[in-house]
Image: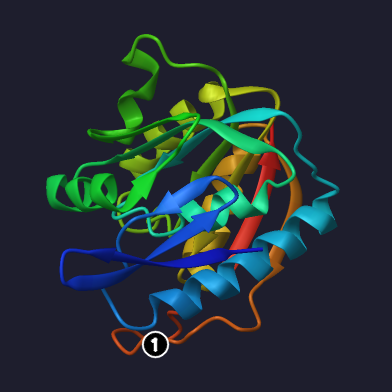
């Protein structure tokens, strides 16, 4: 459950929200994101139950191509009763990473947001093996060769028994992603079409977290 506390900073009031020890320091930047996050939380609960996935202990979580990483708090809630001990978000966009750094805090754990190429994870020193790798709204259809590299690194970053979770905007891109994962020998544990996905006006058939899949090595 979320514990919402009113906090006064100077003369300006803002909301500080706790998500299973992950703290949101800033509100989301755009209208509608709160609703999207609520629906994503329900979707993750559904797909984890379908896949028979449960988490325990302290987890290492990797969020690839994370953008503003709006889903950070929802991920912390979705793995409960486990807690996030280490969280790394990575994206090429410096402005999005800067925003994520301001928004999220992990008391009692380590949280980082890095500007960089998600296909370079394997070259970074000092990273743990990850219990959960999350990719929200992958873009395989647009740059398949780039995403081939990202998926190689994402699977390599998983510890034995770890899970990779991915959401998609479009039906076709999800099919392409699924085919690429199967070609790598990954095991699909669950695949769910989000019945509550919010339609987006910029393209026909595009909606927020339209599909979610869970994969193991």
What residue is drawn where x is 50% and y is 30%? Answer: 108
> Closer to the camera, 110 or 204?
110
Residue 153 in the figure: left or right of residue 82: left
Seen from this angle, which residue lies furthest top? 125
Find disc 1 in the rendering and name its residue.
204
Q: Report x, y in % for residue 215.
A: 68, 42
Residue 20 pos. (x, y %): 60, 49
Image point (49%, 63%), residue name? 168
Q: Quarter of the image holding residue 130? A: top right
Is residue 138 something one can see in this rendering? yes
Q: Give me the residue at 54% from left, 58% from top.
A: 74
Q: Is residue 164 above or below residue 194?
A: above
Question: 40 or 190: which is nearer to us?
Answer: 40
Q: Mark 1: few, some, or many residues within 10 Å (few <14, many ≥20)?
A: few
Q: 44 above or below 86?
A: below
**Image quadrant containing the N terminus:** bottom right
Vertical side of 16 occupied by 12: above or below: below
């Amino acid at each position: 459950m979320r514990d919402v506390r009113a906090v006064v900073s100077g003369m300006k009031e803002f909301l500080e929200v706790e998500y299973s020890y992950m703290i949101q320091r800033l509100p989301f930047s755009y209208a509608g994101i709160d609703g999207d996050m609520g629906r994503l939380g329900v979707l993750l609960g559904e797909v984890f139950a379908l896949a028979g996935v449960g988490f325990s202990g302290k987890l290492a979580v990797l969020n690839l191509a994370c953008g503003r990483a709006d889903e950070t708090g929802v991920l912390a809630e979705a793995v409960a009763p486990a807690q996030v001990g280490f969280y790394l978000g990575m994206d090429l966009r410096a402005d999005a990473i800067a925003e994520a750094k301001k928004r999220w805090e992990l008391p009692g754990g380590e949280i980082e947001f890095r500007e960089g190429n998600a296909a370079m994870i394997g070259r970074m020193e000092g990273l743990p093996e990850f219990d959960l790798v999350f990719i929200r709204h992958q873009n395989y259809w647009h740059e398949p060769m780039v995403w081939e590299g990202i998926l190689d690194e994402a699977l390599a970053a998983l510890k034995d028994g770890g899970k990779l979770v991915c959401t998609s905007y479009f039906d076709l891109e999800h099919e392409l992603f699924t085919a690429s994962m199967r070609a790598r020998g990954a095991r699909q544990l669950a695949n769910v079409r989000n019945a509550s996905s919010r339609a987006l006006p910029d393209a026909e058939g595009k909606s927020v977290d339209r599909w979610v899949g869970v994969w193991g090595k």
